[in-house]
Amino acid sequence: MLHVREPRTLKKPAGKSTLTIADVTADAALLPAYDSHERIWLGRDDESGLTAIVAIHNTVLGPALGGTRVWPHESFEAGLTDALRLSRGMTYKSAIAGTPFGGGKAVIIADPKTEKTPSLLSSYADMLAALEGQFFTAEDVGLTLADADFLRTRAPNVVGTKSGSGNPSPVTAYGVFLGIKAALRHRRGTESLKGVGIAVQGLGSVGWSLCENLHEESAALTVTDIDTARIEEAKKAFGAKGLAPDTILSAEADIFAPCALGGVISRETIPSLRAEIVAGSANNQLARHEDARLLMESGILYAPDYVINAGGLINVAAELAPGGYNRAAAMAKVAQIPKTLSDIFTRAEVQGRPTNDVAAEIAMERIRTAAAA
């Protein structure tokens, strides 16, 4: 386990809170996933059981914005690595999407089914309030719309609530849906999904909404989830074929849509893929950056995750726009995801480069331009 130094209190929360907030940037810099992150905060409260990490990667474009993930990581180091990787992806996502925000992400190391108590969330809200101005957050894996509403009553820097833009998951799913059609059009010259085989890994809020969109256009769905009941529901709702989680990667499909946790595309799993396109909502789909080159060399078109899944970010970011949330304006911006992807696909093809290299280059171009302004 990574050694964490004696906590340095950032701000003592009001009342009798036992929360401590420590700057652990120097410790995080020892990990391979560290990428010149600006600040890493650790929040701990023994009474509530909170262990929360807020990773702020880059704020050149604006304050950090990213979801809060609640997940029972096997170690503190694993949770920290997840936060580092996710926050870096948020920097690129915000830059590509053209939002005035930087990249950040929060990870609460806890089982969302058994350990996500009101006491734990209250302690986390204290941490968020102390970070106001540095970090804005919303839902992610393990954190629900109801949880976001709970946090918002205690911390001002929470978006994606019922009183704001609402649940971002359907908007994320819609952006992925549009991105899948863009990838299909680039590969086959048509965006018709009728009869197109799509293997969806993960039936959480985003994965389920994506299946609804795909089913409406007569795609042939194959699905999996760690919750077997969810698979049965999808079979009934969408006429989908259900598979065990460990077999979905090798499913006969035209498109593989990873919509669960990250790291599923790797040098070990790519040889098993039968799909010609990888396009899904999961963050950090690649186990390693260089795995995108293996996909390219295998003839598989990859839609960079932080480009195709930016819909939710665009929607919650709109809450913070001058004049407040405007759904029509937010959805118009989401509708630009296919064009962005098409430009990346074309540029990558012309240059003979992996799509994620091109996407990262575009993001960094925008960040460098902003830094020089």
Image (cartoon, helix red, strand yellow):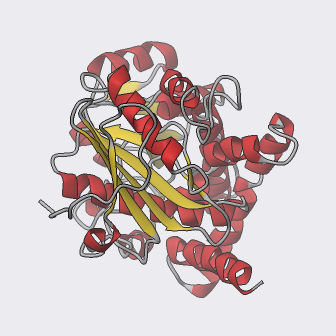
Q: Is residue 47 above or below residue 344?
A: above
Using the rendered view, name the quadrant where residue 284 is placed.
bottom left
Residue at 49%, 40% (x, y): give it: 197
Q: Position of residue 46 (x, y in %)?
A: 21, 36
Residue 196 shows in this picture: yes
Direction from residue 351 to residue 77 in the image, left or right: left
Question: Which of these two is toward me, 57 or 352?
Answer: 57
Q: Is residue 42 above or below residue 230?
A: below
Quadrant (top left/top right/bottom left/bottom right) for the N terminus: bottom left
Using the rendered view, name the quadrant where residue 202 is placed.
top left
Question: Which of these two is toward me, 177 or 326?
Answer: 326
Direction from residue 333 to residue 60 in the image, left or right: left
Quadrant (top left/top right/bottom left/bottom right) for the C terminus: bottom right
Residue at the far front in the pictured view: 15
Direction from residue 61 to residue 54 in the image, left or right: left
Residue at 48%, 48% (x, y): give it: 255
Direction from residue 269 to residue 75 in the image, left or right: left
Q: Is residue 298 above or below residue 163?
A: below
Using the rendered view, name the quadrant where residue 226 is placed.
top left
Residue at the far left in the pictured view: 1
Q: Position of residue 80 (x, y in %)?
A: 29, 57
Residue at 37%, 21% (x, y): give it: 118
Q: Position of residue 60 (x, y in %)?
A: 64, 72
Residue at 65%, 70% (x, y): give it: 344
Residue 273 shows in this picture: no
Question: Which of these two is toward me, 25 or 20?
Answer: 20
Q: Position of residue 234 (x, y in %)?
A: 43, 20
